[in-house]
Structures are given as C-alpha cells and as structure tokens.
C-alpha cells in the first residue's frame, strides 16, 4: 500500500466518519498534525466554533417562504415581509454570508496549518502558495442521489426563483393587481409547493447518517500531504530530536534527587562558553593561539582585521589581566607563535597579502558568493575561501555540500507553501472562513489551490463555483494550469459543473486568487459524494498520484 493510500485508509477507514465538531474530526486533525510534524514542519492548530449541520437553517428558511405563500390571501402585507425576510436569509446562507446559520448551536472545530518558509535572499519575496483540503465529512443526503445530482442545476434555479417570487406575489395581492388576491393566491400556492422538495431534502439531512468520506475528502487531504512530501525536504534524525526534545540544564539539587550522582561525588558547573568549537575532521588547529582575547569578563576574543591588514605595526588588543601576555599579530611571524598562525592562514588558502576588506568589495553581495564562471570556481564552488592545498578538506567539504543538497528540488523548496487542512467545511466552509479571517492580510498575493474529492475519476479544475452567485476561478492560476498540462502532457482539463460551494468559493468571494481541483467519473459526477458508498476502497492510487504530480508541477512553475 502506498503512503497516499495509507493516509486515505487512516482517515476514512480507521477513523471513519468525521462530521464537523465531533471527536472523530478532532482525531483526524491529530493524525494530520502528526504527519506534518514528522516532516519537520511547525504546525498551528487554529480553533473556532461551527455548527455540525446547516440543514436546519435552510429548512427554516424554506418553511418561512411556504408560510408566506399561504398567507398571501389573508395577510398580504405580512406575507410580503415574511417572504422578503426568508429570501434574504436564504441568499445570505447560500452565498456564505451567514443568515440563520449564525444562530445555530455550535461546537469546537479546528484547522491544521503548517508553513514551509524557505530562506529568502535579501530583497527577495518567495511566491506564496496555499494548498487547502478539508478533512470533515458530510452526510448521506437525498440531494446526493444520481437522479437529483443530474437535475441539481434546475432544482436550484427553481428553489431560488420560487423563494424570490413569493414576496412579489404577496405585493401584487396587497395592491389587488392581476384580478385580485384570490388568483395571486393560487399562484403563490404553486410557488410554495415547489419549495416542498428542498424542504424535504433539508429535513432528511437532519437525520441522515454520516459517510466515511474516502473520496470526499480523505483523498484531498492525502494528496495535500503527498505534495508536502514532494516539497519539504525530509528532516534528519538530529532535527527531529531537536524538535521533540529541548536540552535542559538541571541544577545539582535536581541531579541529586534523580539519583544519577555517584556517592561522595562533587558536581562543578562551569559557564557555557560562547566561543566556537574547533572544526572536526580537518586536522588539529590551535585556535587559542590565533585568537586574541580582549574581554576578560566574558572570555571572548576580538580580531582587529583593520590593524592586521592596513597597519602591521599597529598593536593588537591585549588581555588586560595578564601583563606578561605577549602581543601577537594575526598573520605575524614572531617565532613559534607566528609560524602557527601562518599555518592557519595557509590552511584557509589565504596569502600573506590577503585583505578581507578588498575581497569583500569585489564580492559586493552575498548573492554573488556562488560563482557562475566555472574557471574561477574553487573546490567549494564559492568565493568565500578554499581548503588550500589540503585535498582531504576539499573532498570533505564537497561531500557535505552533496549530502545537504541531495534530493532537494530547489524549484519546489524555494516557494513559501502553506498546507491547510480545514475543518467544518460541510456545514458552510467555517474552517476556511476562520483561516482567511486570521491570515487573509498575509495572503493577498498568494495563489490558493483547493483539493476536494480528487480520488476517483478524471481530474479537472472548476471554471466557476457557488450557489447563490457564480464565482469564476482565478484566470492567472488557470493559465498556469493550462501551461503545465500542455508542457507535461498531464490528463487534467477545465470543467464547468454545478458542485455547490467549496473552500475556494469563500476565497473567491473575498477576491482571493483561487481554483478548485476535483475529479469526475464517466457520468460527469463526483464519485459517491455524500453517499454511504464513499469509502476508502473506491479511492485509487493513480488518481492521487496524478493530483500530486500536477500540483507539484504547478508549484514549480510559479
């Protein structure tokens, strides 16, 4: 079993259904957090409150519209006010602006956020990319049946139209237009009957069982973690140990209480020296004789390079507390001390006339330390010094460089990538709202890629999405998608489909640059979405690998 499939199996199989604000959702967040931390990333757990279901709010809004339609004959003005209120609240909830949904009972949910921030050079601003996938699951509702999904667009249009026409019919009845209130009343009853279907769907959602969510959306989380493993270099054992365990300096009393001190032993604590340790593996270098102490209180040393390079007769700083201590020059040749210091300069590959200030002026910037001209390249590949004539030192330095950079794709690793697993998406994208509320100002120039239900079928990006209003996907990001598809010959294409709202919808409504990746089966539907058949077994490795490959190439091209 691949690692991608293992993520799906853990979320949809071991943990199972993960409705918003439940303990199972929190367990899924724990699992995602462990995977991100194992890669060496610092993880933030953003907590917020959200309802478990939003069906009750929609059911109440449909019921208000139906009541308004019935009251048209006897209380047209009251019917009009009630119908307007129901229409406005429905619009706000469908457009993710919180109508009645804000008054629903809420529980705790959370986002899991990790950032891969590369070391930027001076003046550089790495491109920011946000990869989002929700990990909570929905319920097996009536609107997920194939017959309903096939007619989802028409049903949504009828629902919105009937809701908007009920207050208009009430107004006509109040003004005694079109033959009086009785005829208008019959029309309003027809409008109310149309709303019985969405009301029944919402009421059924209140008692519908939760689904395992293998495709929707353990697949999206698995793909996000797969992209993370492509982008973030794997940490070594020392890094992981440093993250998990910090060094602790214990007192003598604590050591005695822990019974780790031999009887009659005397513990003596010495201050931690700020001085650098000698390099290991490059021979023995007597740094103490090359170091010139000037601060007896701290034991640190200061080298006056200006005095050493410009004026050889200038006295070097001395150690005040020892009057008999001889003054030494950094590159002088005074007896045995001068010969030892001279050996240090030879090992560093510096001639007697080396002027660090002049060499620094030639380099001008740290960005120019790495040479482009191979003829000027030294054994390290940098201007910052060589290992001299010591072949072992040069070989060891080259080996260290190869070990550090091996397996690191710089085109990927040098991008600032946010990995965001959102909770409480199903009841109204509450997790993405909380994320943008907290970090929206930092991500105004970021590109947001949302992974939702990508585990079965052909991968595509949504050209538009939304319920009450249609939001078009970011054109610049879409152009990058098209270029990657063309150059890498990947099986991904744009698609127009009525899929409702996603985490990208709220981002687009707030004018962020976002697109959603989603997979569709041969019938043009999201496979098993919100059905009891949405298990871990239906997700395929090929589909997940395609997503990881595609998103990785997109990040590379940014």
Image (tube, rainbow, N blue to C red):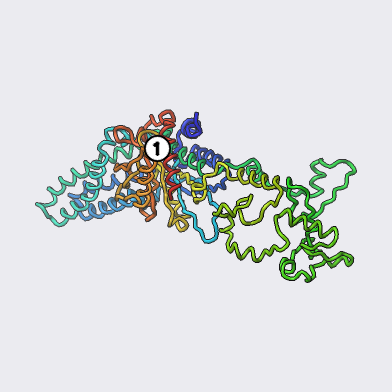
Measured as percent of width and height from the top left, residue 527 is found at: 35, 33
Taking depth in this image into account, of 101 and 188 the one nearest to the observer is 101
Residue found 20% across the figure and 52% down from its top: 75
Quarter location, residue 511 = bottom left
Q: Position of residue 269 (x, y in %)?
A: 82, 52
Left or right: 72 in relation to 416: left
Q: What residue sits right under mark 1 in the picture?
A: 454
Find residue 396 and report its image quarter: top right
**Residue 452: image x %, image y %?**
40, 41
Relative to residue 394, is residue 299 drawn left or right? Answer: right
Horizontal side of residue 479 vs 403, given as left or right: left
Q: Residue at x 29, y 33 (%)?
A: 523
Q: Residue at x 39, y 31 (%)?
A: 534
Q: Is residue 210 visible?
A: no
Q: Position of residue 19 (x, y in %)?
A: 44, 38
Asked which quadrant contains residue 450, the reply is top left
- Classify mark 1: residues with Cα within 10 Å, few (<14), some (14-19) or many (20+): many
Farthest left residue in view = 179
Depth check, front residue: 105 or 523: 523
> Quick one: 536 or 194, which is closer to the camera?
536
Let me know if residue 126 appears in the view. Answer: yes
Disc 1 secondary structure class: loop
């Amino acid at each position: 079993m691949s690692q991608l499939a293992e993520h799906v199996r853990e979320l949809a199989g071991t943990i199972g259904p993960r409705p918003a604000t439940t303990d199972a959702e929190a367990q899924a967040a724990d699992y995602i957090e462990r995977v991100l931390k194992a890669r060496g990333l610092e993880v933030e757990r953003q907590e917020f409150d959200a309802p478990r279901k939003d069906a009750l709010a929609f059911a109440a809004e449909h019921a208000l519209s139906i009541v308004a339609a019935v009251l048209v004959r006897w209380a047209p003005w009251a019917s009009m006010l009630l119908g307007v209120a129901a229409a406005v609240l429905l619009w706000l909830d469908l457009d993710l602006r919180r109508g009645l949904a804000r008054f629903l009972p809420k529980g705790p949910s959370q986002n899991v956020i990790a950032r891969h921030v590369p070391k930027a050079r001076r003046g550089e601003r790495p491109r920011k990319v946000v990869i989002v996938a929700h990990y909570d699951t929905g319920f097996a509702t009536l609107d997920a049946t194939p017959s309903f999904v096939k007619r989802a667009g028409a049903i949504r249009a009828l629902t919105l139209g009937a809701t908007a026409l009920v207050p208009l019919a009430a107004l006509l009845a109040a003004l005694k237009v079109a033959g009086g209130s009785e005829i208008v009343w019959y029309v309003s009853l027809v409008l109310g009957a149309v709303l019985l279907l969405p009301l029944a769907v919402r009421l059924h959602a209140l008692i519908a069982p939760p689904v395992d969510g293998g495709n929707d959306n353990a697949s999206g989380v698995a793909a996000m973690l797969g992209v993370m493993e492509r982008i973030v270099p794997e940490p070594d054992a020392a890094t992981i140990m440093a993250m998990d365990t910090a060094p602790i300096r214990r007192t003598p009393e604590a050591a005695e209480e822990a019974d780790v001190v031999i009887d009659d032993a005397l513990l003596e604590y010495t201050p931690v020296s700020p001085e650098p340790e000698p390099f290991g593996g490059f021979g023995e270098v007597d740094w103490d004789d090359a170091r010139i102490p000037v601060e007896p209180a701290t034991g640190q040393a200061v080298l006056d390079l200006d005095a050493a390079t410009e004026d050889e007769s200038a006295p070097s700083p001395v150690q005040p507390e020892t009057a008999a201590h001889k003054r030494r020059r950094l590159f002088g040749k005074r007896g045995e001390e001068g010969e030892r210091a001279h050996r240090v300069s030879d090992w560093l590959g510096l001639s007697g006339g080396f002027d660090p200030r002049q060499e620094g002026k030639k380099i001008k910037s740290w960005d120019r330390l790495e040479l482009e001209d191979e003829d000027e390249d030294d054994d390290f590949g940098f201007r910052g010094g060589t290992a001299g004539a010591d072949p072992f030192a040069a070989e060891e330095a080259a080996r260290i460089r190869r070990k550090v950079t091996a397996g690191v794709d710089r085109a990927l690793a040098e991008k600032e990538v946010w990995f965001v697993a959102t909770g409480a998406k199903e009841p109204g994208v509450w997790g993405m709202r909380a994320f943008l509320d907290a970090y929206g100002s930092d991500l105004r120039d970021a590109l947001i890629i949302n992974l939702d239900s990508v585990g079965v079928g052909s991968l595509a990006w949504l050209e538009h999405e939304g319920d009450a209003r249609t939001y078009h996907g970011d054109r610049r990001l879409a152009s990058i998608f098209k270029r990657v598809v063309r150059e890498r010959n990947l099986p991904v294409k744009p698609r127009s489909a009525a899929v409702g709202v996603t985490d990208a919808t709220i981002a687009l409504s707030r004018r962020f640059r976002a697109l959603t990746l989603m997979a569709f089966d041969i019938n043009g539907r999201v496979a098993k979405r919100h059905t009891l058949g949405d298990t871990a077994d239906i997700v395929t490795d090929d589909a997940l690998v395609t997503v990881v490959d595609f998103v990785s190439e997109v990040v590379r091209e940014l």
